Structure formats: structure tokens, C-alpha cells
Image (cartoon, rainbow, N blue to C red):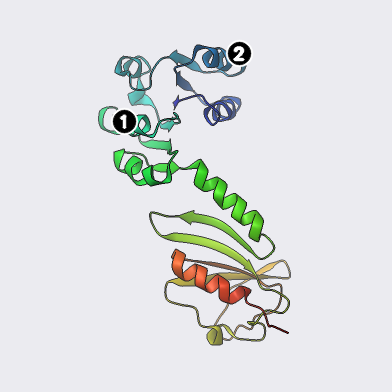
Amino acid sequence: MVIGAGDTGMPIISYLSERGHQLTVIESKEERCKEISDHSDAAIFIGNGLDLDIWKTTEAERMGTLFVLTNDDDINMKICEIAKKQFGIPFVISRAHQPNNIEKIQEAGADVVICPSKETLRLFLNAFESRTTETLYEQTVEDFKIVKVTIPLNGCIIGKTLDEFGVPRGCRIISVCRNFGPIYPTKSFVFKGIDRVLLSGSHEFVDKTVEKLRSVELI
């Protein structure tokens, strides 16, 4: 079930419909409902996502997954509560417009909360730093991220072993990509220029390790 067929909801509805999912949509705007009916195979209900009569009509208790995609975080929180407490939907994915509402929406019942503004920021920063660094995964609430770093040709770490480099406790080097293959480094592993280092851990320690890996010899 998808609640909210806006800029995010419409492509999700199209994607799910094209792949043959049994799909139910609740949307308040009649013109969007017509557009969905013209292009997607879905049961469509015009109305508010907080209307319990609509929920009962859709047999929401049989739904496996719910996408909560309205433009109002307060409404999204209430919908998540309804989904979990009254209908027991096992998997709820919700949108958060404001980053400071992510935790509140999770507490309301969402299993996954996605904040487009945070994702956009991550993509822009990845583009900015793409020559040396790329954030592959980031979870603020759990304080965890996975980053790939390319060691510069004149990097300070070149020629040093992993043991000499010293990785802090809050961070771990997962692997190093070299010559199109992964290496799982031991303490005696020696870094080279253009090595692509995959590391994970808390934001603070990963960021510090990234800066050390990216540091260069000043001429």
C-alpha cells in the first residue's frame, strides 16, 4: 500500500505496478488518482491517509508493506502508528521531510525512514568528494557509515603497513581494492597509491580515518 502519490509516490507506484505487485493507493487529489489509473494497475482510494474507514475498506491488515509518502511529517507519524498498532502491517517505510523528525517517525512505528533532503546532501557531497571519497551507506541514528577512499598518488600513507597506520577502535578497514580485486589486509599489508579502501564504523572515527588516508605529502 502507498499513501501519498506526490513526487516520490508516483514513480514508486509505477515501479511496483510494472513489476506486478498487488498495489493499493490512497491519495487525496483526484487528478493524481486519475493519472495512476491511466498508467498503473492499482486499487485506488481517494481520501485522507488518516481515514480509518478507507483503511478498513482496503483490508490493510493483509498488506505486507506500506509506503508513507505524504508531505506532512505529523501525518506520516500518525499513519505509522495506525499501520503498526491497529493493522499490524509488518514493514512500514516512511518519508521524513525534516531530518529532526526521523527519530520521531521511527518511534511512531516506521521500520525504515528516508529523508530526501539528507539523501540529496549526501549525493552532492559525494559528487564534490568523488575524486577521493564516496559514502556508500550512512545511518545517523545508529551512528554508522561505510565509506570508500582512494589513496592519492602522493599520499602520506603510501609504503606504510596497516599496523603502522593504526586504525582507531571505532573504525574498521573492511577491504582494499587493488588491480580489480579485493584484499583483506593483515597488519603487514602495505598501502599503495590508488588503493581503494573500504572502511566502516562510527561517523567520528570514520571521518578521522578518511582524512588520514587522504592526506598527501607536501612538496
View extreme (left): residue = 85
Give coordinates of residue 13: x percent, y percent.
Answer: 54, 26
* Residue positioned 50% across, 68% down in the render: 206
View extreme (front): residue = 219
From the viewer's perspective, is residue 218 above or below residue 4? below
Circle 1 residues within 10 Å: few <14, some 14–19, many ≥20: some
SS class of the residue under badge 1? helix
Res. 194 image quadrant:
bottom right
Circle 2 residues within 10 Å: few <14, some 14–19, many ≥20: few
SS class of the residue under badge 2? helix
Of residues 176 and 140, the one drawn nearer to the viewer in this rendering:
140
* Residue positioned 46% across, 19% down in the render: 27
Point out the tag, 1 or 2, that comes first from the N-terminus: 2
Circle on res. 121: none
Residue on which disc 2 sits:
38
Give coordinates of residue 3: x percent, y percent.
Answer: 43, 25
Q: Amino acid at mark 2?
A: Asp
Is residue 61 left or right of 10 when viewed as pictured?
A: left
* Residue positioned 35% across, 29% down in the render: 75
For the C terminus, give its image quadrant: bottom right
- What distance separates the C-alpha of mark 1 from that of mark 2? 30 Å
Give coordinates of residue 179: x percent, y percent.
Answer: 73, 70
Is residue 10 left or right of 61 when viewed as pictured?
A: right
Res. 195 image quadrant:
bottom right
Q: Amino acid at mark 1?
A: Lys
* Residue positioned 38% across, 34% down in the render: 73
Residue on which disc 1 sits:
78
